Amino acid sequence: GRSAIFEVVPVTRRFRAAINEAADYDTLYDVARSEGAITMRQDGLLKALQGIVRYEDVLRVTTEEETAVTLKNP
């Protein structure tokens, strides 16, 4: 079978305010992360640990940048 990995960004009041203020990408990213957003790679790695998807497939379909950001801002 197939399983999906997702990038989940909860649209909280703080995140919505940042959007309405036309915040730049870095600000939106920081707000999203502080409000509980997870990257596709994070979701994929969690699913790989649970045996739902293969680790190799997670690496193939996500970017290295996500890993650097994840390691920088756990």
Image (cartoon, helix red, strand yellow):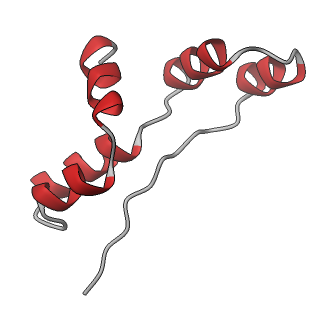
- The residue under the point 55% across, 15% down is 30
- Of all residues, the one furthest to the right in this rendering is 20
Residue 66 location (% of width, % of height): 35, 32
- The residue under the point 12% across, 57% down is 56
Quadrant showing the N terminus: bottom left
On the picture, is 21 further left or further right than 47?
right
Residue 61 location (% of width, % of height): 31, 56
Q: In the rendered image, which quarter is residue 24 located in?
A: top right
- The residue under the point 51% across, 17% down is 34
Residue 25 location (% of width, % of height): 65, 20
Quadrant showing the C terminus: top left
For the question of whether residue 50 can be seen, the reply is no
Residue 16 in the image: above or below residue 40? above
Residue 71 location (% of width, % of height): 24, 19
For the question of whether residue 12 can be seen, the reply is yes
Q: In the rendered image, which quarter is residue 27 located in?
A: top right
- The residue under the point 41% across, 39% down is 39
On the picture, is 5 further left or further right than 54?
right
- Of all residues, the one furthest to the bottom in this rendering is 1
On the picture, is 63 further left or further right than 53?
right
On the picture, is 24 further left or further right than 59?
right
Residue 59 in the image: above or below residue 18? below
